[in-house]
Image: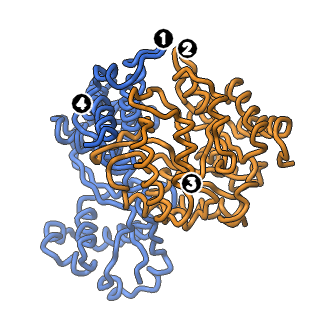
Amino acid sequence: MSNYAALLDSMMNALLTDDTTAARSLYPDKKDFSAEEQLSVYVHGYRIRMHKVIKNLYTATHYYLGKDVFQKLVNDYITSTPSHYFNIDKYALEFADYVALTSDDIFACELADLESMLREIYHKPETPPLDKGWLERQTPDSLTNTPLYLRAASRLLVFAYPVSDYITAFRADENPVKPMETMTYLMVLRDSDHMQRVPLEEAEYVLLTLVDEGLTLGAALASEGFAPFAGNEHLAEDFQHWFLRWVNEGFFRITI
Amino acid sequence: MTDATADQSTLGFGLGLRQPHYELVLENNVPVDWFEILSENYLEAHDGYWRFLADVRAKYPLVMHGVAMNIGGTDPIDIAYMTKLKRLAEVVKPVFISDHLCWTGVHGINSHDLLPIPYTKEALQHITSRIKKVQDMLGRQLVVENPSTYAEFIASSIPEWEFLAELAEMADCKLLLDVNNVYVSAYNHRYDAKCYIDAMPAGRIAYIHLAGHKNKDTHIIDTHDDHVADQVWELYGYTVQKFGTINTMIEWDGKIPAFDVLLSELDKARGIAKTAGRGAKP
């Protein structure tokens, strides 16, 4: 290793280990500004920067866990997990995975997961939505036999807790408390510059998941995966209602 | 529309384009000659941001300024990053593409900071070679900015100003002279800021950065969250007196104020350039 590379490695090591003991061998003392203090600017700056980007993204998770627990979790993440990508946002996005790996609190994990998803989906590519005009041109046959594709900036999500409602209440300054466990189904999508979180019924979520896997609506409705809901006497009515909403909310993208 | 290859010396007085002012800048004809964007804010942003940039570009010349090229690093140049940067440049058609004389990480680990270089002959050769590669990839000259630094390696054998001047010559790149950074580093390392300015090769300076900082007595942190300090204005006056009027912009990245505040700072730069500089842009 060259001397240059060794010097860079020494500094990087100090940043990652939060240790400035090597400073004296690397940097000269300045009047009133010691070698340790010089290196500390970078070492502390590293932690502050990583902490800040995570705190800015996980505001609801921070609120739920409280300052001390959240800070410890973030500090542990920074200590154990370096960033491997030029975009610091990715480092923050992956914090949700760390919470899932290290926390037994399912609600906290789901909250962090949704906050991460909202940011990730926000930057997915724009895909223009199908509109009502398209729907009006469809016959019942063509509607059920045409492959449909979800917008690129969208994701179907399922949670054991109503985390989306919690985030809504948090953002409205309603001081939410941890809710009861309740399975919730969600479509998250970006339309233009706006993020939407659309609550779904369970059957609706299952149907959309099957469509997302490549089945036409007709095939999805007749599939084994949808069988538990196929006997519902209001299915035709529900389906009409769902489909109108999917088109109105812009769930599907233009591909034809 | 300004051509990317033209008007390099007469851009005038610009501002950093930041989110709180997007709408205002796009929907009005603001008295700003050009804008600098932070490349990394857009490289992986959704298409709407790219359309916005294309719309802004139709009204104002743009400059792309980066923080993640890792030009002083020892890892291979990040091809994926460079590919994204080049793609953005195709849309933005920037007058300049700049980044910092620094390193941001090693062994695939990113510090997301602008870390200081040990100014040695080995470093000079290493960084020259990397700038040449980057320029080949981009098909244009890179503009390299002097960083604010808080630590100076014992191993450094060349003063930063000499290193930068020689680097520009060897790599045939342009320089982004950050006058605030010169002041900050000079304060932190107890050297004469004017000596730094004096060593700059005038013909290589593409543009000047001005920004606010936080003085903590024993050292200064480059915060970009306040007005340009009086001492930096003075150094800016010294710089334009020496080199004539140079393209200049104000960076303000934290606690971003109302647009009028930025315009006042820019007017101050214009005034100083007019008084101190030769051939200031009317």
Q: Residues within 10 Å of mark 4 (few under 14, many from 20)?
A: few
Q: Amino acid at mark 2?
A: Asp
Discs 4/1, front: 1
Q: Is residue B277 visible?
A: yes
Q: Which residue is mark 4?
A: A76
The secondary element bearing badge 1 is classed as: loop
Q: Which residue is mark 2?
A: B217
Q: Amino acid at mark 3?
A: Cys
Discs 3/2, front: 3
Discs 3/1, front: 3
Question: Residue B29, relative to residue A181: is it above or below?
Answer: below
Q: Residues within 10 Å of mark 2 (few under 14, many from 20)?
A: few
Q: Which residue is mark 1?
A: A32
Q: Are marks 2 and 1 in contact (CB under 8 Å)?
A: yes
Q: Which residue is mark 3?
A: B173
Q: Amino acid at mark 4?
A: Asp
Q: Are marks 3 and 2 in contact (CB under 8 Å)?
A: no
Chain letter of disc 4 in the image: A
Q: Amino acid at mark 1?
A: Asp
Q: Position of residue B169 (x, y in %)?
A: 57, 51
Spatial CA distance of label 3 from label 2 is: 35 Å
Discs 4/3, front: 3
Residue A215 vs residue B86: left or right? left
Q: Are marks 4 and 1 in contact (CB under 8 Å)?
A: no
Considering depth in this image, is B121 or A210 the residue closer to the camera?
A: B121
Q: Tell me which chain appears orange.
A: B
